Image: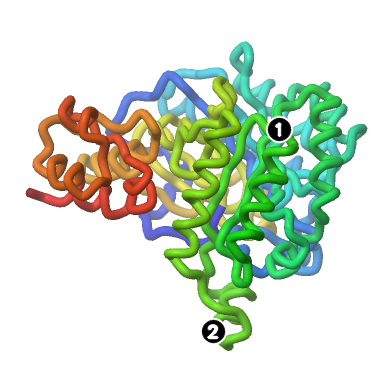
Amino acid sequence: MSPAVPPGEAIPPAGPLDGVEFTLPPTPRFGVYLHVPFCRVRCGYCDFNTYTAAELGGGASQSGYPAAALAEVRLAVAQLDSAGIPARRAGTVFFGGGTPTVLPASALARLLGGVRDAWGLVAGAEVTTEANPDTVDEPYLEELAAAGFTRISLGMQSAVPRVLATLDRTHTPANVGRAVAAARATGLGVSLDLIYGTPGESLADWRATVEAALALEPDHVSAYALGIEEGTRMGAQVRRGELPPTDPDDQAAKYELADAALGDAGLTWYEISNWARPGHECRHNLGYWRGDDWWGVGPGAHSHVSGVRFWNVRHPRAYAARLAAGRSPAAGREVLGRTERALERVMLGVRLSGGLDVGPHPALARLVADGLLDADAARAGRARLTLRGRLLADAVTRDLTEEP
């Protein structure tokens, strides 16, 4: 979760859903996101809402986080009920960060138990945690599996030690293999997260990373182009000339390499940055792209309920203090109007491999001629990205949302 807080209206004392005229009915699918904002070390490229122990200060702690998060879960149930939103069992639960697995496995199990007690879980619910490879072993993952976790998303990032050092990652390539083996032994599904375009990473380095990832036979792979953000240590290094900036052409070549290799290995792209074996797509993230409802728990977490977006205060200390006082931790909200809903529908939906129904849109013919959309789908009024279109998805979104 990025630390950036969007502009929005103030939250009423009764909570983020108080006094709202809802613009959308509740979606049948419902997910829960739990943000665990702690890391052992802050990576130089990261601008997410995370904190090391030295950065927390008084009034916040890793040991106290589960109690605060469970207080928000209970508050969320009460707020949904008072807003007249029908109770729905969670179909997906996702623990992100930060590094959720810096907490003891018992703490993650306790949090999942709290979600189960509050909302219930649908049969076959998908329950995921992100993890750094050097924070988990087989006993840890056995405890998670026994608690109901079904998959783990490992931050592999690269198989090249020099690239990992540039990213300030603490694990070694061997840690990844051990973590995957431990996950397999405990019956958990495995997703690997990769980053391409790190300063100094060659095409050969990236090929070695993709091949090493495939050798571990994951169920799912996410591959993201590195973005160098202002305010990060890496951003400062680039500004001082200590590292080169990212190169869009280099990143495009690496995306195409990954797409070809992953496809040849049986992992099909289903969203621009995500590939999976059939039946192993991340259902939680699909909920975001399809506009489902979800409640985000934790410092800086974002939520979407029936056309209302809201977000929590960022710092764990402020988060814990609000909940200790019986107050909502929400910091702001936005009620999506017709224009905002239409933009989000295109911006998110076009990223999926199935494309998006846009009807007889005037931009379709031009986007097909530019090689960005599939011609057969466009004839049926559907915007489905080609490989080139995936590389230029922002331009496609602009064309599909601009007034004719």
Residue 172 horizontal/vertical position (percent): 82, 56
Few, some or many C-alpha atoms within 10 Å of disc 1 (few <14, some 14-19, many ≥20)? some
Q: Nearer the viewer, residue 198 or 11?
A: 198
What residue sits 37% from the left and 44% below the top? 387
Residue 367 in percent (x, y) is at 19, 46
**Whether residue 322 is visible:** no
Q: Mark 1 points at which residue?
A: 217
| Residue at the image position 84 percent from the left and 25 percent from the top | 186
Closer-to-camera residue (279/370):
370
In front: 378, or 229?
A: 378
Q: Earlier in the sequence, mark 2 or mark 1?
A: 1
Image height of 137 relative to 40, above or below: above
Q: Is mark 2 on a helix, strand or loop?
A: helix
Q: What residue type is labelled 2?
A: Arg
Badge 2 is on which residue? Answer: 239
Disc 1 marks which amino acid?
Glu
Residue 341 numbered tag: none
Q: Where is residue 40 shown, x and y percent of the image?
A: 80, 59
Query: Which residue is situated farthest in the right direction here?
Result: 139
Outermost residue to the top: 123
Q: Residue at x 57, y 28 (%)?
A: 266
Which residue is found at the position 7% from the left and 49% from the top? 404
Instruction: Give the CA distance from mark 2 to mark 1.
Output: 38 Å
- Secondary structure at numbered mark 1: loop
How far across and how far down the image is residue 196, in percent?
A: 58, 57
How many residues crowd around disc 2 within 10 Å: few (fewer than 14), some, or many (20 or more)? few
